[in-house]
Image (cartoon, helix red, strand yellow):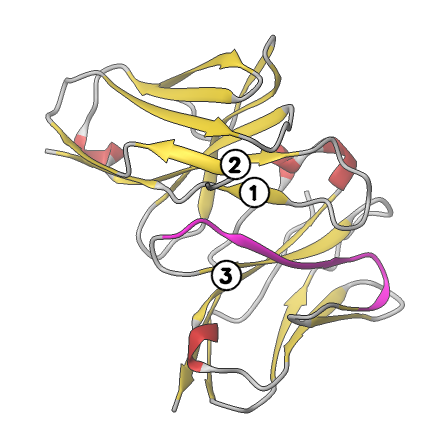
Amino acid sequence: DADVTQTPRNRITKTGKRIMLECSQTKGHDRMYWYRQDPGLGLRLIYYSFDVKDINKGEISDGYSVSRQAQAKFSLSLESAIPNQTALYFCATSDPGQGENTEAFFGQGTRLTVV
Amino acid sequence: LAKTTQPISMDSYEGQEVNITCSHNNIATNDYITWYQQFPSQGPRFIIQGYKTKVTNEVASLFIPADRKSSTLSLPRVSLSDTAVYYCLVGDMNTGFQKLVFGTGTRLLVSP
């Protein structure tokens, strides 16, 4: 089983619909992140959470919301989807950081298409 | 945030050594240098991380000069499966990944 699991893997939705992307992890990490990636570009941070009571906006949070239901679960919602939210979405986790070899673990991604 | 600059793309052939250099002139004292690999439609995967001098693991080596203003990821004897995008990131690992910036990376194409 994957350490970081995203559901669904692919989704097509209509403009104006509400959609939720889910992420669960078995790493036991407190820190979780949501990124989006557009074709040919790097990843951009949408939201991040350092624990269940801590939610923070990233660089492109407009149009998105998140929920940290438990240490292992972090969901991303698009309240009213629009076509320019069509992208590949990644969830990631990391531990608090111990210096060397502190890494982020990424899910397989959710490909979202808004038509 | 330490800005990084790396080549947009590189080409190589199977069996060759590939060196990808990343420039990070304003790296801070507490910053580490980390490289990730990403295959199409997959999440990035950690390759290697270092602070200074040389770090080697079973996949790659990371060379960091004394001034730490640049770093070089070295992939020995690449194969077709090493075709991917490689990201160089610089940041303080203790503060979390929210401050790490994934740029456009270096797209490596390995040909037969």
Real-space CA distance between mark 3 and mark 1, rounded to the nearest whole angstrom: 18 Å
- Residue A28 in magenta stretch: no
Q: Residue at x 44, y 74 (%)?
A: B81
Asked if marks 3 and 2 fall on the same chain, the answer is: no
Q: Which one is in front in this view, the residue at disc 3 or the one at disc 2? A: 2
In the rendered structure, the answer to whether residue A72 lies left or right of residue B111 reads: right
Q: Residue at x 51, y 27 (%)?
A: A58
Real-space CA distance between mark 3 and mark 2, rounded to the nearest whole angstrom: 18 Å
Number of residues whose C-alpha sits closer than 10 Å to that of mark 1, classed few (under 14), some (14–19) or many (20 or more): many
Asked if the residues shown at circle 1 and circle 2 are in contact, with their CB atoms under 8 angstroms apart, the answer is yes
Span highlighted in magenta in the image? B42-55
Which label was assigned to residue B56?
none
SS at badge 1:
strand
SS at badge 2:
strand
Which label was assigned to residue B105?
3
- Residue B43 in magenta stretch: yes
Of the image marks 1 and 2, the number of the one nearer the N terminus: 2
Can you say whether B51 is above or below B76 in the image? above
Number of residues whose C-alpha sits closer than 10 Å to that of mark 2, classed few (under 14), some (14–19) or many (20 or more): many
Number of residues whose C-alpha sits closer than 10 Å to that of mark 3, classed few (under 14), some (14–19) or many (20 or more): many
SS at badge 3:
loop
Residue at mark 2: A92
Q: For the residue marked with disc 2, what is the amino acid?
A: Ala
Give residue A70's position: percent from left, percent from top: 53, 13
Which label was assigned to residue A105?
1
